[in-house]
Image (cartoon, rainbow, N blue to C red):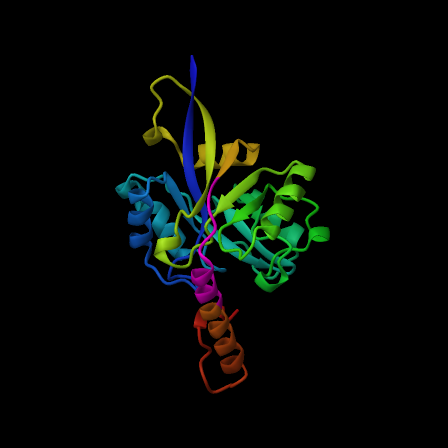
Amino acid sequence: MSNELTISVDPHVHSDGSYDGHEPVELILEHAADIGLDSVVITDHDEIEESLYAAEIAPEYGLIGIPGVEVSTAHGHLLALGVEERPSPGRPFLETVEQVRDMGGVAAVPHPFQRSRHGVRKHRIDDCDAVEVYNSMLFTGYRNRRARAFAERNGYPKLGASDAHYLPNVGRAYTEITLEVDHGFTQADVTRETVIGALAEGSTAIQGKRTPIHKSTRQYAKGAVKKASYLFTSRMPVVPTVPASMDR
């Protein structure tokens, strides 16, 4: 006899391993456990070391360890969920999708169509494994509604995520994944492969709410300052680039 088990995952969170992140993974995992999440995927920008570490120690916090990364493709950002290596940045979008799949991961499009946030344009998304249809860091619901309509029209599994860069925002939006399990099967028995497989099959529901505008504004402003610092220092040959994690 089979039963249903629901797993709650925030699949898009940034740690201090990302140029615009702020929190160590230990605090993120502790917070995720405290608010009742079953897993949180650290998806730093083009960096995977902290995510691998988080996935390794997640069971110590009662969480399912799932590594990932937000990779910069030639046409916008892509979440590579469940991978243990960083896909090569700067490659065409569809080529990166295939690389993520070859690595055993799920290729999910975050904040699609948003050029200011390096979202992939609609005409570029000919294939992917999932679409982030609820990103809590949006000022209005318009972009989320567009993303949901696009995912439903094309039959893509739908994700909700916090896109948190600060601890209080972790889990503000998340994805519920429904698993068909045998009697006696518990959350402790769930593996990353089980979660990734169910996610790709589309057994998802979206929960959460938008981050307050003043918090979103602060996050965007600090990110813009760091990008401006990088652009300025990258043009000065005798000065190290700041932040160095953007130097690719």
Q: With respect to residue 195, does 121 lie above or below?
A: below
Task: Tell me if 242 is positioned left or right of 248 in this view.
Answer: left
Task: Tell me if 29 is positioned left or right of 213 in this view.
Answer: left
For the point 48% across and 60% down, the residue is 45
Q: Which residues are magenta?
A: 207-220
Q: Is residue 215 magenta?
A: yes
- The quadrant holding residue 231 is bottom right
Considering depth in this image, is 246 or 22 the residue closer to the camera?
A: 22
Spot occupied by residue 98 in the image (x, y as percentages of width and height): 62, 46
Question: Which residue reaches farthest right?
Answer: 123
- The quadrant holding residue 92 is bottom right
Numbered disc total: 0
Question: Which residue reaches farthest top?
Answer: 1
Q: Is residue 85 visible?
A: no
For the point 41% across and 62% down, the residue is 21
State which quarter of the image contains the N terminus.
top left
Q: Is residue 46 magenta?
A: no
Spot occupied by residue 204 in the image (x, y as percentages of width and height): 52, 34
Considering depth in this image, is 234 or 101 the residue closer to the camera?
A: 234
Spot occupied by residue 37 in the image (x, y as percentages of width and height): 36, 40
Q: With respect to residue 45, does 145 lie above or below?
A: above
Q: Is residue 57 visible?
A: yes
Considering depth in this image, is 37 or 47 the residue closer to the camera?
A: 37
Spot occupied by residue 50 in the image (x, y as percentages of width and height): 38, 56
Q: With respect to residue 128, does 75 lie above or below?
A: below
Q: With respect to residue 229, does 79 lie above or below?
A: above
Task: Tell me if 133 is positioned left or right of 155 in this view.
Answer: left
